[in-house]
Image: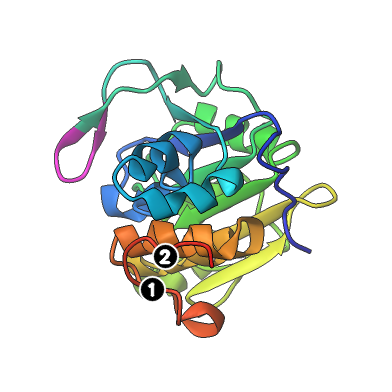
Amino acid sequence: MTTSIPNAKSKPLRIGVLYEEVQLTDLAGLDILGNMSSRIVNMVTNLIPAMEKLKPYARDMEFLYISSSLEPAWATPDMFIRPTHTYESAPRDLDIILIGGPDPQKVPEASLTFLREASKQTKAILTTCTGGMWLAKSGVLDGKKATTNRILLEPARHVFPNVEWQDERWVTVDGHFEGAQLWTAGGAKCGIDMVIEYALQNFHEQLVASSCGSLEFEIEGRSKSYKGPFVPVV
């Protein structure tokens, strides 16, 4: 079952991003989503008029950056991102949550409480690398198939035996309410490809192709022909 994204006239998509000493590259897929926002598509249309045909498929988006406090949050390689919400103040009923890879042994209890509660209301949770172990630590993945960075699969099986860890690039399973999904990916490149697949299932295909093309990300498989910068609607 695919996650249902409302049409372009609906209220903005709310996308939560967890920052807690994460690997920044694990969150690279965020730009794939951002490039499909009304703000970016409108901006690019000023430069490339052919993009006008994609504007009806773009979505208004609101990005929420969530961490332990509102102080700048550390991320690799020694970068600091200013959060907009704490785990306590962030809404639980988001459209998408993206989770990069931290040291799963050091994530705060408040983040686990947030994930338990958000998993009951958020439509799609996407993790990359040890972000899967972060989600597993909350108990959200108990009894479900999931993956993490390939080099950490055995430790993950030992620490979180209630999860069915898979040696796959990414794994998609049903979430905790009808229509919800949980996506877990391996390392950063797997996470990028996972977000591309999520986007293909939930956005106009040529809008996804335009987003990926601008980033020089190839779309593999069924849409491999859609690559290169800013593919216009035919």
Which of the labelled discs sits on residue 231, or is there none?
Answer: 2
The residue at the point 54 percent across, 36 percent down is: 15
Given residues 168 and 202, the one toward you in this image is 202
Label 2 sits on a secondary structure element that is loop
Given residues 197 and 78, the one toward you in this image is 197
Q: How is the image coloured?
A: rainbow
- Magenta run includes residue 97: no
At label 1, counting other C-alpha atoms closer than 10 Å, the crowd grade (few under 14, some 14-19, many 20 or more) is many
Tell me which amino acid carries mark 1: Lys
- Magenta run includes residue 75: yes
Q: Nearer the viewer, mark 1 or mark 2?
A: 2
At label 2, counting other C-alpha atoms closer than 10 Å, the crowd grade (few under 14, some 14-19, many 20 or more) is many
The image quadrant of residue 89 is top right
Magenta span:
73-79
Where in the figure is residue 213, as x and y percent of width and height?
A: 35, 64
Where in the figure is residue 221, as x and y percent of width and height?
A: 51, 84
Residue that mark 1 sits on: 227
Cα–Cα span, label 1 and label 2: 7 Å
The image quadrant of residue 228 is bottom left
